[in-house]
Amino acid sequence: MFHKIFFITNLLLTILKTNCNKRLEINKNSIAIFRPIYPEFRINNIKYREGINPLFVMNFRPGIYNVSEYPLSVYPSWAKYGNNYFKNSLIKTDWKIIDKINFNLHKDSIVNIIVSSYNPHFYNISKMNNIEYKIYHNHEQLYSTNYPSFDFISKYHFNKGPHLLTLMAKTNDVACLCPTIGDGFKSGHHFAIWENTIENKRNNIPIKITLPIYHKENNVIKIDNFNVGVKYNLNLFTK
């Protein structure tokens, strides 16, 4: 009896916390980075499938929003998303392009990249199931991991001109990052970029640099030896 009461109490607390509205005021076009804690992520009481990812970014136009959780950071910019965000990606033993982003810079700029993968569906359940992911900028590898679910965020200084970012994956069996599984909130990925407008105003760096913030693999956050990530200010556009 005690265990049932404890379970029901925790369930009710989770529902209350999930549906609890937090006021987010946006003064200009901005991006907001979220790392959700609770099962459902909502804006104005509408559930967004981005919330299944361990880390994601969303665009906000000026206005007042009720969000289920406060963002990690908010600052003026506008994100560009991958081409295959709502498409199923069947992963096999050969490298497969999961998503890509083409963009053009009118000047040398600092660009943020965010990538998440959540709960790929394996067709043959086994403890040996494995997926390897790689992120490329043009033909240069930026990041790799072999965890089925992961998230990655980093910033880079890219030169003026056209650029191509690619997310690739392969597995030892057959798996699918499939937003069509179940109710659409079971599996998927997130892939987006945005120009770091604040640091672009502060810096004019002629060489290419890499400044990782952190990445998380299967709930383990790994911080690089040189921790020089962006210092976010939650109060910049929130009340």
Image (tube, rainbow, N blue to C red):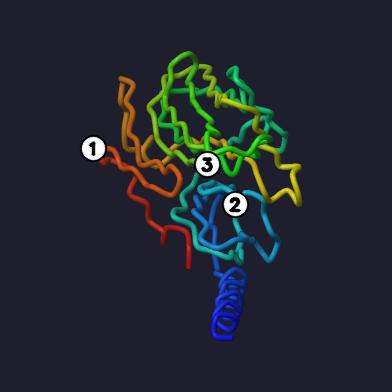
Q: Secondary structure at mark 3?
A: loop
- What residue is shown with label 2? 60
Crowd rating for badge 1 (residues with CA inside 10 Å; few <14, some 14–19, many 20+) = few
Q: Residue at position x 53%, y 32% from top?
A: 130
Crowd rating for badge 3 (residues with CA inside 10 Å; few <14, some 14–19, many 20+) = many
Q: Which tag is nearer the camera, tag 2 or tag 3?
A: 3
| Image quadrant occupied by the N terminus | bottom right
The answer to whether the residues at label 2 and label 3 have Cβ atoms under 8 Å apart is no
Look at label 2 and name its amino acid.
Answer: Phe
Q: Secondary structure at mark 1?
A: loop
The answer to whether the residues at label 1 and label 3 have Cβ atoms under 8 Å apart is no
Q: 30 or 90: nearer the eye?
A: 90
- What residue is shown with label 1? 225
Q: In which quarter of the view is residue 199 placed?
A: top left
- What residue is shown with label 3? 149
Identify whether 116 is placed above or below 91.
below
Q: Secondary structure at mark 2?
A: strand
Look at label 1 and name its amino acid.
Answer: Asn
Q: Residue at position x 26%, y 41% from top?
A: 227
CA distance for labels 1 and 2 = 33 Å
Q: Residue at position x 34%, y 43% from top?
A: 222
Residue 71, image x and y in percent?
49, 57
Ranked by sequence position, the earlier of labels 1 and 3 is 3
Look at label 3 and name its amino acid.
Answer: Ser
Ranked by sequence position, the earlier of labels 2 and 3 is 2
